[in-house]
Image (cartoon, rainbow, N blue to C red):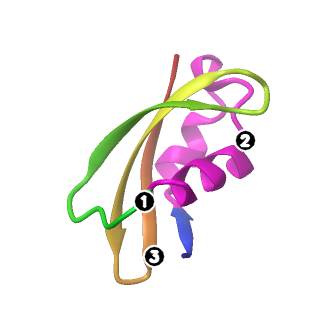
Amino acid sequence: MRIIITEHAKKRLSDLRQEGITPADITMAAGNIPGRIPTATRFRGFIARSGRVFDLVAKDIPGGRLVITIIGK
């Protein structure tokens, strides 16, 4: 499945709260969500390689899985 990360999500990666989360971590987390996501949904408790816990908001679109935003803990 193709994972699309929005510009908003990429911009948030530079914030202090999301420090240590990489696009590769986001792609891995979004790809591990099973099933279909028809509406924007928040998924909690992913762990980046750096050890930072984060949530992501994603939804499925015809082009793949769209990651709307990232919320670091």
Disc marking residue 59: none
What residue type is disc 3 on? Gly
- Badge 3 marks a residue whose secondary structure is strand
Q: In front here: 1 or 63?
A: 1
> Which range is magenta?
5-33
| Residue sitting at x 69%, y 44% | 25
Q: Secondary structure at mark 2?
A: loop
Mark closer to the chain start, 1 or 2: 2
Q: Nearer the viewer, residue 24 or 12?
A: 24
- Residue 10, horizontal then vertical, whole percent: 59, 47
Mark 1–mark 2 distance (CA, rounded to whole Å)? 21 Å
Q: Tell me: 49 left or right of 29.
A: right
Q: Which residue is mark 2?
A: 22
* Residue 57, picture quadrant: top left
Circle 2 packing at 10 Å, graded few (<14), some (14-19), many (20+), is some
Q: Percent from the top left, x then y, of residue 72? A: 53, 23
* Residue contact between numbered discs 1 and 3, judged by CB atoms under 8 Å: no
Tag 3 residue: 64
The quadrant of the rendering that contains the N terminus is: bottom right
Residue drawn at x 48%, y 47% as measured from the top left: 8
Measured along the vertical axis of the image, is residue 54 above or below residue 22? above
Question: Would you call the spot at circle 1 few (<14 residues within 10 Å), some (14-19), or many (20 or more)?
Answer: few
Please give the label number shown on residue 34: 1
Pick whichever of labels 2 and 3 is earlier in the sequence. 2
